[in-house]
């Protein structure tokens, strides 16, 4: 099993930490992982993206040009990475702020209104955890229990009381992710 | 129990420095490696181990602080990226000339000039052919993973003190910025030994120690050079490190180092999937270079492609190794661009198999 | 008194300190370096810190200072002595560390290293020999060369419009909160040499108390570079250098 994922969106949407959380979960599950951010001017408020790879085998290249899954959280990211999904692959997009829908027919496409849900939950900070939930529903590459274990490891102890909220957000994401079209 | 973590290459090297029992770090921020000094400042190693960390006013000052500490027989290091390493060339030459041990990390970015902050391997020549003035060599380790970045910090200090020579870790923006699973080695004690060549305060029973690279008499300076050359021959005899993948039945060969070797490995897997029998040799030390291993394979394969994130630097060493036995070509992307596995496979097919 | 009486031990009033080696100095006749070396070596001797002192030599006339001081020493690249000394002192904080630098080393190529070491308040002593000229390379203009002063690269005299003004490093570093003791002295008369020695001794004592950077400028002569006899050069120094670089303490610890 190898899952090669690109996660892209605005700086501040928690794009980079989503990749890290998935990788931490992978480590907890005994998988090989690699996380590679875009860095540079992007770090300062523009678009940001990271590549996360989770695999049963040793990972060769940490830098990729095509992906099994693209998680896109804004319009520029959809424009940039829709084409980079391998045929038969998966694209998940955040509904809010998109001016057009994905157009490919050879990949499966899911939408997730994660921003609206985070507002409903009165905490926009859990936005990225909702998206992770949606992804894990469609591609259960890591067990939820290991994602939580990863969070415990990555969060300083003083934030551990927030883990419950994050877990709840993941469940919400799993509930609201919606198939738009299957690969033809 | 294994100390397993998910860490960025730069941060992992910083943690490794503390654990390797380093006495001092002197550095100046530059992208893409500023996480090293940021991590060290956050960790406050002065409290953990007594290690001193100082943000210098420039790379020029940083490398000379390393010189001062190394001259006292301390485990001293600095890290920088390409433009900063150019500024350190003077200090490195003096350190090599005075035969002091130290560790320097270059997290390479694209050049020339201010260039780009994206990853590159265009400092290969600078690293393995000297870089500063005079006949000297750095021992150059080229990690391809975060794990190797960590292990090479420890190994780097060991080699530096074994040969009393500066050691460079030639990393790049990919390995510095990426996160991987890494197993950290246990905390090593800091040095307590007082070396006979170090300035630690004159003892009544010995002459004063002078750390210098200056010999006004040419005869004496030639002797220094002969001693250095003899040392480099020892290094070349003892310290060559490389890994080879699927070379036993290979008809063709990739040679690549560092992060580029990983991308090339993916290209190798794709090629094997198409029935092309290609192997990969990855130098882990680029000085000393694995000339013999490549020469041996040159007799077996129909062609060699040197894959680099530069305009063709290591390929010159590959050609020296091959010595005309088979075709050698170069494929590279540069200026911060990263080759894709598909591009590399295509280059193999066009330049070597079809060429 | 017969000559053999003069050299008998009971008549000995002054001798070379053992902190100077027996090597013959390479400095030109009449140059101030020899006296400056001696004052510093005597201080190290009198404080009993020979085994705890580490020096840093510059690039310039005193590049070979490590042959004369019988203490452990490191040779720095041109201008980098304060950085090298920082590396030493940070890892060997219990040692007495000094740099010995000329005007080209300290005030031209090494200005950044000097200012930043002083600004950080590194706990070492900087001895700054200012003779307004590059002696070793054959009499070129220094950053401290006086207006109108001739050198091989200002053969018609230093024109401050095109060549800039003499740099008063000592006044500059006195402004920095990191420095604790900043003074300007000379060694051209026995009285001045004694004053310099007292300053150097104070500096080493402050270093022991970790008070910050001590900076001792010694305005000196360069008979060869100035193309004068030693006596003429001392007179010229008094008449021309001292008005621009006045002697005395600039900053003393409270």
Image (tube, coloured by chain):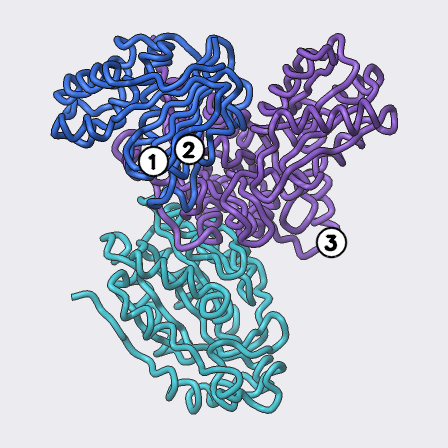
Chain colours: A blue, B purple, C cyan
Helix, strand or loop at label 3? It is helix
Q: Which percent across, then down, holds residue B225?
A: 71, 43
**Alpha-carbon neighbours of circle 1 within 10 Å: few (<14), some, or many (≥20)?**
some
Query: Which secondary structure lies at badge 1?
Result: loop
Question: Which residue is identified by label 2?
Answer: A78
Picture layout, residue C36 above or below residue C69:
below
Front in this rendered view, residue C165 or C219: C165
Q: Which residue shows up at 54% across the image and 40% down it?
A: B108
Whole-percent x, y for residue B143 in the image: 54, 27
Residue under disc 2 on the same chain as residue under disc 1: yes
**Residue beneath disc 1:** A98
- The Cα atoms of the two marked residues, 2 and 1, are separated by 9 Å
Q: Residue at x 74, y 33 (%)?
A: B330
**To which residue does mark 3 refer?**
B218
Mark 1 or mark 2, which is nearer the start of the sequence?
A: 2
| Comparing labels 2 and 3, the label whose residue is closer to the camera | 2
Question: Mark 2 and 1 residues: CB-CB less than 8 Å, in contact?
Answer: yes
Mark 2: give few (<14), some (14-19) or many (20+) Cα within 10 Å: many
Secondary element at image label 2: helix
Q: Is residue A59 left or right of residue B222?
A: left
Locate the C terminus of chain C and report the quarter of the image it occupies: bottom left
Residue visible at 57% across and 87% down?
C150
Q: Nearer the viewer, mark 2 or mark 1?
A: 1
Same chain check for tags 2 and 3: no
Pointer 2 indicates a residue of which chain? Answer: A
């Amino acid at each position: 099993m190898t899952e090669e994922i690109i996660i892209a969106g605005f700086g501040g949407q928690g794009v980079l930490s989503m990749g890290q959380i998935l990788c931490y979960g992978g480590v907890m599950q005994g998988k090989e992982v690699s996380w590679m951010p875009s860095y540079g001017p992007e770090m300062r408020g523009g678009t940001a993206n990271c590549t996360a790879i989770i695999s049963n085998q040793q990972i060769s290249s940490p830098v990729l040009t095509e992906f099994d899954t693209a998680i896109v959280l804004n319009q520029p990211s959809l424009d940039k990475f829709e084409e980079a999904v391998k045929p038969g692959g998966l694209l998940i997009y955040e509904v809010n702020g998109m001016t057009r829908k994905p157009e490919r027919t050879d990949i499966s496409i899911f939408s997730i209104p994660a921003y609206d849900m985070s507002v409903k939950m009165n905490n926009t900070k859990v936005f990225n955890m909702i998206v992770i939930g949606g992804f894990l529903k469609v591609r259960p590459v890591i067990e939820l229990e290991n994602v939580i274990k990863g969070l415990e490891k990555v969060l300083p102890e003083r934030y551990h009381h927030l883990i419950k909220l994050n877990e709840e957000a993941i469940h919400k994401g799993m509930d609201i992710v919606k198939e738009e079209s299957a690969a033809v | 129990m294994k100390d397993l973590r998910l860490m960025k290459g730069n941060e992992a090297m910083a943690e490794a420095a503390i654990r390797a029992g380093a006495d001092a770090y002197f550095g100046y921020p530059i992208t893409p490696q500023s996480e090293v000094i940021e991590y060290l400042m956050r960790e406050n190693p002065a409290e953990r181990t007594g290690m001193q960390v100082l943000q210098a006013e420039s790379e020029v000052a940083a490398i000379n602080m390393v010189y001062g500490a190394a001259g006292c027989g301390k485990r001293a290091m600095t890290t920088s990226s390409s433009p900063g390493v150019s500024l350190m060339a003077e200090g490195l030459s003096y350190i090599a000339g005075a035969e002091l041990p130290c560790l320097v990390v270059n997290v390479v970015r694209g050049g020339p000039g201010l260039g780009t902050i994206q990853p590159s391997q265009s400092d290969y020549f600078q690293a393995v052919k000297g870089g500063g003035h005079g006949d000297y060599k750095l021992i150059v380790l080229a990690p391809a993973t975060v794990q190797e970045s960590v292990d090479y910090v420890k190994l780097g200090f060991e080699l530096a003190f074994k040969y009393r020579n500066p050691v460079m870790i030639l990393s790049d923006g990919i390995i510095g910025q990426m996160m991987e699973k890494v197993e950290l080695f246990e905390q090593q004690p800091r040095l307590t030994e007082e070396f006979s060549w170090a300035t630690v305060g004159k003892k009544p029973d010995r002459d004063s120690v002078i750390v210098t690279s200056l010999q006004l008499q040419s005869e004496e300076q030639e002797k220094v050079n002969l001693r250095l050359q003899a040392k480099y021959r020892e290094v070349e005899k003892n310290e060559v490190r490389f890994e080879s993948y699927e070379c036993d039945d290979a008809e063709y060969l990739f040679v690549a180092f560092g992060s580029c070797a990983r991308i090339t490995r993916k290209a190798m897997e794709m090629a094997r999937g198409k029935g092309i029998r290609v192997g990969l040799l990855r130098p882990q030390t680029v000085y000393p270079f694995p000339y013999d291993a490549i020469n041996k394979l040159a007799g077996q394969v129909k062609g060699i492609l040197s894959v680099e994130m530069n305009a063709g630097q290591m390929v010159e060493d590959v050609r020296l190794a091959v010595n005309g036995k088979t075709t050698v070509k170069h494929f590279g992307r540069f200026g911060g661009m990263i080759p894709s596995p598909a591009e590399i496979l295509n280059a193999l097919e066009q330049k070597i198999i079809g060429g | 008194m017969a000559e053999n009486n003069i050299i008998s031990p009971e008549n000995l009033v002054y001798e070379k300190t053992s902190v100077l080696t027996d090597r013959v100095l390479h400095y030109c006749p009449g140059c101030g370096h020899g006296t400056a070396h001696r004052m510093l070596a005597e201080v190290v001797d009198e404080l009993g810190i020979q085994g705890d002192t580490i020096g840093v030599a510059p690039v310039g006339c005193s590049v070979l200072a490590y042959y004369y001081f019988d203490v452990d020493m490191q040779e720095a690249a041109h201008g980098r002595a304060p950085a090298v000394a920082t590396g030493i002192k940070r890892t060997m904080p219990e040692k007495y560390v000094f740099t010995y630098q000329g005007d080209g080393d300290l005030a031209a190529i090494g200005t950044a290293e000097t200012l930043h070491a002083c600004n950080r308040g590194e706990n070492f002593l900087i001895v700054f020999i200012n003779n307004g000229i590059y002696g070793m390379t054959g009499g070129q203009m220094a950053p401290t060369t006086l207006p109108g002063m001739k050198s091989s690269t200002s053969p018609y005299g230093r024109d401050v419009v095109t060549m800039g003004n003499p740099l008063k490093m000592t006044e500059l570093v006195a402004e920095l909160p990191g420095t604790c003791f900043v003074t300007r002295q000379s060694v051209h008369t026995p009285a001045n040499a004694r004053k310099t020695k007292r300053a150097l001794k104070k500096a080493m004592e402050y270093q022991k108390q970790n008070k910050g950077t001590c900076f001792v400028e010694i305005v000196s002569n360069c008979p060869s570079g100035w193309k004068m006899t030693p006596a003429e050069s001392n007179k010229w120094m008094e008449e021309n250098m001292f008005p621009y670089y006045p002697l005395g303490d600039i900053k003393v610890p409270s």
